[in-house]
Image (spheres, rainbow, N blue to C red):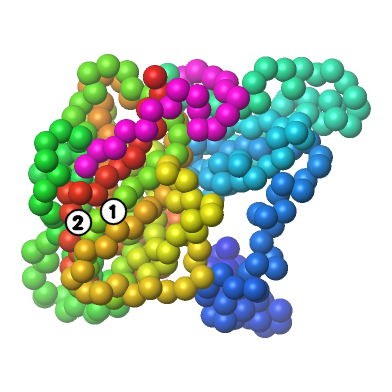
């Protein structure tokens, strides 16, 4: 938000003051942020609420309904809709019938049917159909873990041993134009085998990453893609974590969804294998026979990020080693 605002003429006060406080003086979660954090107060909301996003809006709004789902007061009337990709980027442009039915029900006391049926409604991409549920994660979800094997396979088959390396060279390193290309790639990928039958992947996703770096800090940026039968890849969702911010909030974290405290910096010991729990924004996708899932890992996502929203990296060049013990936890229905 600040990056976008600072591209246009603006007044020194209060905008420079706000940027200094948010981006420089309070880089960790402290009393300043705690006073501004509305999340702990979600459970105090006593008016009906309608949560929603679309599967495309990974970098901005999609994760919010899932992040607060456990905190909302379920005794207060609520509904949640996760809509098809690209359909709800800006809520006021979409779902006009649902919005009118919602407000007519609660403000004009009309029976519009908006509260009929289960409270969760989601669109299953690939199957091109609407489904409903009562809870999240969805009933019947089977969490499955696949290892990141050194041959590039994403699988639970075989012993998880070995590793792969990639190189992160930030632009700030200033290599000369005639420098030889790096001998290591700037990203790694892993693919599942082609699915033999339809597979519905709907829900929270987590990467448990065992990695080592030559630097004291590094950014882990993860993307999941659907690879079709012709080999074309399409983005599904992303996750990201700065290594030094890996400390977890044990009170909020769940086996399928890590929450980080962001209250301190824990520098890496160069070369020491370390575990990282990386939350990947939920998705809802049916994989058809012959399609497969791809995981991509890098430390800089310029030209790689979904929605064109890339991250500012920590700026340290590094050789990163990813161990096969790393596991991707995926939610499979049925």
Quadrant showing the N terminus: bottom right
Residue at 80% x, 19% y: name it: 112
Residue lying farthest right? 108
- Give the answer, above or below, for where 103 lies relative to 224: above
Instruction: From the top left corner, tell me how far across and down residue 127 is, in percent.
Output: 42, 19
Q: Main secondary structure of the magenta part?
A: strand
Residue at 42% x, 64% y: name it: 247
Q: Give the range drawn in magenta.
A: 128-147
**Closer-to-camera residue (1/134):** 134
- Residue on which disc 1 sits: 209
Residue lying farthest front? 251
- Residue on which disc 2 sits: 322
Q: Does the magenta stretch include residue 145?
A: yes
Could you tell whether 21 is left or right of 216 in the image?
right
Q: Is mark 1 on a helix, strand or loop?
A: strand
Q: In which image quadrant can residue 172 be found?
A: bottom left
Badge 1 vs badge 2, beta-carbon distance below 8 Å: yes
Instruction: From the top left corner, tell me how far across and down residue 44 is, in percent.
Output: 77, 48
Instruction: From the top left corner, tell me how far across and down residue 151 is, in percent.
Output: 10, 44
């Amino acid at each position: 938000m600040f990056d976008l605002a600072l591209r246009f003429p603006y007044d020194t006060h209060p905008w420079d003051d706000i940027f200094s406080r948010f981006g420089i003086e309070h880089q960790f979660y402290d009393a300043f942020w705690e006073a501004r954090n509305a999340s702990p107060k979600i459970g105090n909301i006593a008016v009906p609420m309608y949560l929603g996003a679309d599967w495309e809006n990974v970098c901005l709004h999609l994760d919010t309904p899932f992040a607060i789902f456990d905190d909302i007061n379920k005794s207060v009337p609520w509904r949640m809709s996760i809509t098809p990709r690209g359909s709800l980027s800006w809520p006021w442009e979409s779902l006009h019938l649902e919005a009118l039915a919602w407000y007519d029900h609660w403000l004009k006391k009309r029976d519009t049917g908006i509260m009929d049926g289960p409270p969760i409604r989601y669109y299953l991409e690939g199957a091109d159909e609407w489904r409903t549920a009562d809870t999240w994660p969805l009933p019947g979800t089977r969490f499955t873990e696949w290892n990141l094997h050194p041959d590039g396979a994403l699988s639970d088959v075989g012993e998880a041993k070995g590793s792969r390396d990639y190189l992160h060279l930030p632009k700030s390193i200033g290599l000369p134009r005639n420098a030889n290309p790096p001998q290591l790639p700037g990203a790694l990928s892993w693919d599942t085998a082609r699915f033999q039958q339809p597979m519905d992947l709907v829900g929270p996703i987590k990467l448990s990453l065992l990695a080592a770096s030559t630097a004291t800090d590094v950014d882990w940026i993860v993307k999941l893609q659907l690879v079709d039968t012709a080999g074309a890849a399409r983005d599904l969702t992303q996750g990201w974590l700065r290594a030094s911010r890996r400390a977890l909030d044990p009170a909020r974290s769940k086996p399928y969804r890590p929450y980080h405290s962001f209250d301190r910096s824990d520098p890496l010991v160069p070369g020491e294998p370390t575990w990282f729990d990386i939350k990947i924004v939920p998705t809802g996708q049916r994989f058809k026979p012959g399609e497969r899932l791809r995981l991509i890992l890098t430390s800089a996502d310029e030209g790689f990020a979904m929605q064109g929203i890339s991250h500012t990296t920590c700026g340290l060049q590094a050789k990163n080693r990813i161990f096969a013990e790393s596991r991707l936890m995926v939610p499979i229905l049925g």
